[in-house]
Image: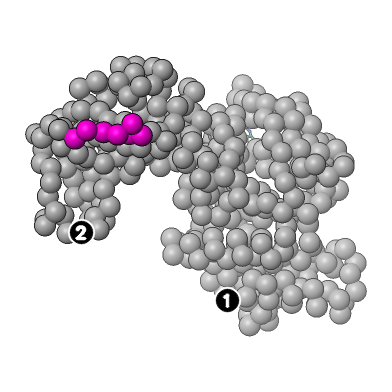
Amino acid sequence: MALIQIRGLRKTFGSVTAVAGITLDIESGEFITLLGPSGSGKTTVLRMIAGFENPDEGVITLGEEEITHLPPFDRDVNTVFQDYALFPHMTIQENVEYGLRTRKVAKAERARQALEAITSVKLAHVADRLPHQLSGGQRQRIALARALVLRPKVLLLDEPLGALDRQLREEMQIELKRIQREAGITFIFVTHDQEEAMRMSDRIVVFNEGRIEQVGTPEEVYERPATRFVAGFLGVSNILEGEASRAVGGSGASISIRPERIRIEPDSYKSSGEESALVGLLTEVAYLGANTIFIIEADAGARISVTKLNQELPSQNVRFATGDRVLAVWRKNHASEISV
Ligand code: ATP
């Protein structure tokens, strides 16, 4: 049985439907990410799991217990927010001990558990400092230690890395994943950054306008996007419709194919049975350093973007120029039909 079961969850604010009835199972020990654009309802779902928001409809179960309307402190979940407010006049050690103190844990035990949590985020050497003496990334890790020390079954993280610069953010992504794996705690992570979601998650839940578009592993949602929205939100995709779809043997339903899965061949090329091909005019070649991007206007009426990784110097490896008649070729099993 899933650790968290969400059934028909719905929340409106006045005339705005923030969450339009979602159903989702979250397994014990998994790192699951709610991914979607701003305003798609991710935070509202998280706040309903935490107990800061009351759903209009639906049920949330944690383990055996229905928690839909329990107050936050009666749930075995803990939240790490983006603005990780630490108490400014307490040392790092005291900040992390604070939650244990309110739970009446004895002094020596409190100190031991807090130091263990601080060590798990690799900051034992700053335990005696005050928050303002730490960097942003260190403060973020302490906020995490403060949540971990309470050993919740579930940790909710709302864009916790949003305020960090890019390099620190990438370091913290790796760090967070390590901590989650070691602690064995279920992480529910909210972000609008697809790369961040891909890097850390066991599964990704893609949100759009208060609804779930798709749930799957990073590979599943990238390789087999269920909808046009998912295909466009996770990376870039070519969508073939109507005549272009039928020209490659599709039913006419939309087909998604990633630019990096397409290669260019001369129009005399004979494709194999495992391949699909569309003939067209090469209209653009853009060298971007690591990649070169080609645009092909297919005769069947699609604009196809092709990305080629530059493993050779392009200047010594020119095969095609704008104005050439070419074939865009890809393996059939690299394309997927999308519903809407
Ligand atoms: P972001 O990434 O910007 O945080 P999100 O996907 O987390 O976005 P939510 O914060 O859940 O989205 O918001 C979903 C919708 O509900 C938005 O249209 C938002 O304006 C609205 N909303 C959220 N909280 C409230 C509130 N307390 N009062 C009124 N409207 C709200």
Other residues around mark 1 within 10 Å, as few (<14) / some (14–19) / many (≥20):
few
Q: Earlier in the sequence, mark 2 or mark 1?
A: 1
Q: Is residue 149 visible?
A: yes
Using the image, determine if residue 170 lies above or below residue 27. below
Image quarter for ligand 1: top right
Image coords of residue 105 (percent x, y): 89, 69
* In this view, 187 is above or below 295: below
Amino acid carrying label 2: it is Glu
Task: Please give the count of numbered marks on the rendered protein.
Answer: 2
| Residues at marks 2 and 1, CA–CA distance in whole angstroms | 48 Å
- Camera-side residue: 126 or 289? 289
Q: Is residue 245 left or right of residue 142?
A: left
Q: Please check the rendered image and state whether residue 171 is part of the magenta-colored stretch, yes or no.
A: no
Residue 312, label in figure: 2
Residue 13 visible in the current orientation: no
Measuring from the top left, give residue 292's x and y in whole percent.
22, 48
Residue at 19% in and 35% down: 269
Q: Position of residue 279 (x, y in %)?
A: 20, 28
Q: Secondary structure at mark 2?
A: loop
Please tell me whether residue 270 belongs to the stretch shown in magenta.
yes
Disc 1 target residue: 133
The quadrant in which residue 91 appears is bottom right
Q: Is residue 137 above or below residue 203?
A: below
**Segment tinted magenta in the rendering:** 269-275
